[in-house]
Amino acid sequence: MKEKTQVGIIGAGPAGLLLSHLLHLEGIDSVVLEARSRKYVEERVRAGVLEQGTVDLLCDTGLGDRLRREGLVHRGIELRFDGRGHRIALSDLTGGRAIWIYGQQEVVKDLINARLAADAMIHFEVGDVRLSGIDSTKPVIKYRLDDREHVLTCDFIAGCDGYHGVSRESIPAGVLRTYHHEYPFGWLGILAAVAPSTEELIYASHERGFALHSLRTPEISRLYIQVKPDEDINEWPDERIWEELSIRLATNDGWTLTYGPVLEKGVTAMRGFVVEPMQYGRLFLAGDAAHIVPATGAKGLNLAVHDVHKLAEAFIAWYRKGTNDLLEQYSNRCLGRVWRVQDFSSFMSLMLHRYPEDDGFRGRLQHAQLEYVCSSEAAARSLAENYVGPPHV
Ligand SMILES: Cc1cc2nc3c(=O)[nH]c(=O)nc-3n(C[C@H](O)[C@H](O)[C@H](O)COP(=O)(O)OP(=O)(O)OC[C@H]3O[C@@H](n4cnc5c(N)ncnc54)[C@H](O)[C@@H]3O)c2cc1C
């Protein structure tokens, strides 16, 4: 089966779907190829914190109806340590900017609905995806669907296939410089059918390790505890998770955590990863295919959105004006923000997690850092500015 499109997009995560949507609004054709089923990608529980810039882009491009109705605007977060909570007033410190709580899977559902309503080509459950000719003007994606071999010829390919995808691996050896950092901890996360015990996110530093109380809706909570990166989830029956969360989130004033049925649980290792440049020939990497940040800063989804915003601008300039400056500058226009976010995510991770090898010195530094952020307006403003994210420019 021979097919053609302007932009071939690999991956129907937030990056690939949003890119397809932004291109469609400008009359640029794309085909999205996804290895998993539609049900799987629509139910995959991951991020839930949207930066102001992400929300602005989604709303400005016609994707804001359900987000405005069901999303929860948060104007602050809490840092909790020594049994006390300290509010960081995000909006007051950033001229009114805020974060929104709206699950990544809801963003994905909205995107898929919008794309299919516009008769978009999204192929789910494709197999054996291979890229060729990426340094030519007609790159090709071969894939299998329904036991048939397909050959998709494109003007450009967008590799939006996440950290484990095939796009990055298709770039010849020696082109990319890879930066990699493994943090010595992971997160055990649960999704629970219980009303959140808090109105705003709580980031807790405790001698037994970090804990985060997040949420998805007024009825669904999302909570995490620091564990070893290779922690065996079978060692953690639900009751043990709730008890550990209760200990790490406890305050001196009797705050209590409400338990509830666990809908889903899993362990994620924390890593930092970046490839430079994020492009080669006619292949452009976006989102987790190009970079991973530890989840402590709540940034992965937001970075993916920023990347494809810049990539869409570059494709639009190429198709509308015949200019390739923005395509050439794509990596550079993204990497400044990528490293800013790596730094912020690292700052939050280092401040809040227990280090296995710590002899006490690091713990005292962390405590000093927390005290500073919670007592200095300048330090709190810096955290707030990074947390809500700078506007897309
Ligand atoms: C537990 C957890 C919590 C997180 N919390 C947050 C948070 O609070 N805030 C935040 O901003 N970010 C968070 N993140 C990160 C965020 O989820 C990711 O950064 C985001 O999913 C990146 O989007 P993406 O489209 O680049 O990649 P993905 O969402 O990974 O999408 C890539 C898609 O490509 C598909 N694919 C892979 N290989 C192939 C192939 N060979 N052929 C075809 N398709 C392929 C995959 O199936 C997938 O659907 C979290 C991540 C995890 C794991």
Image (cartoon, helix red, strand yellow):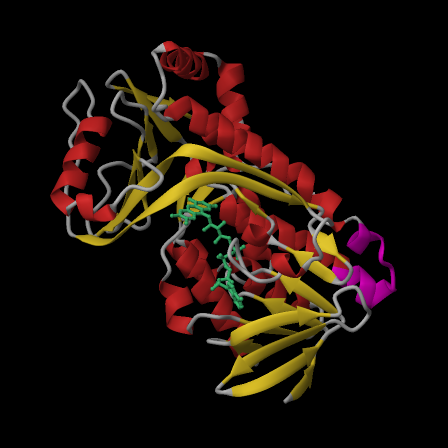
Q: Position of residue 242 (x, y in %)?
A: 16, 39
- Which residue is nearer to you in this view: 151 or 224? 151
Query: Measuring 40% from the left and 59% from the top, which residue is drawn there?
Result: 105
- Which residue is nearer to you in this view: 95 or 276? 276
Query: Measuring 87% from the left and 59% from the top, which residue is drawn there?
Result: 323
- Which residue is nearer to you in this view: 116 or 36? 36
Residue 375 appears in the picture as rendered: yes
Residue 120 appears in the picture as rendered: no
- Magenta-span inclusion, residue 317: yes
- Magenta-span inclusion, residue 327: yes
Depicted 33 relative to depicted 239: above or below: below
Q: Position of residue 157 (x, y in %)?
A: 69, 66
Query: Measuring 62% from the left and 68% from the top, which residue is drawn there?
Result: 9
- Which residue is nearer to you in this view: 261 or 294? 294
In screen coordinates, is 200 left or right of 219? Answer: right
In screen coordinates, is 371 left or right of 286? Answer: left
Q: Position of residue 186 (x, y in %)?
A: 36, 38
Residue 206 sits in which quadrant? top left
In screen coordinates, is 21 left or right of 50? Answer: right
Quarter placement of the N terminus: bottom right
- Which contiguous range is marked in magenta? 315-328
Q: Position of residue 41 (x, y in %)?
A: 42, 65
The extreme front residue here reads: 173
Query: Measuring 30% from the left and 35% from the top, which residue is drawn there?
Result: 227
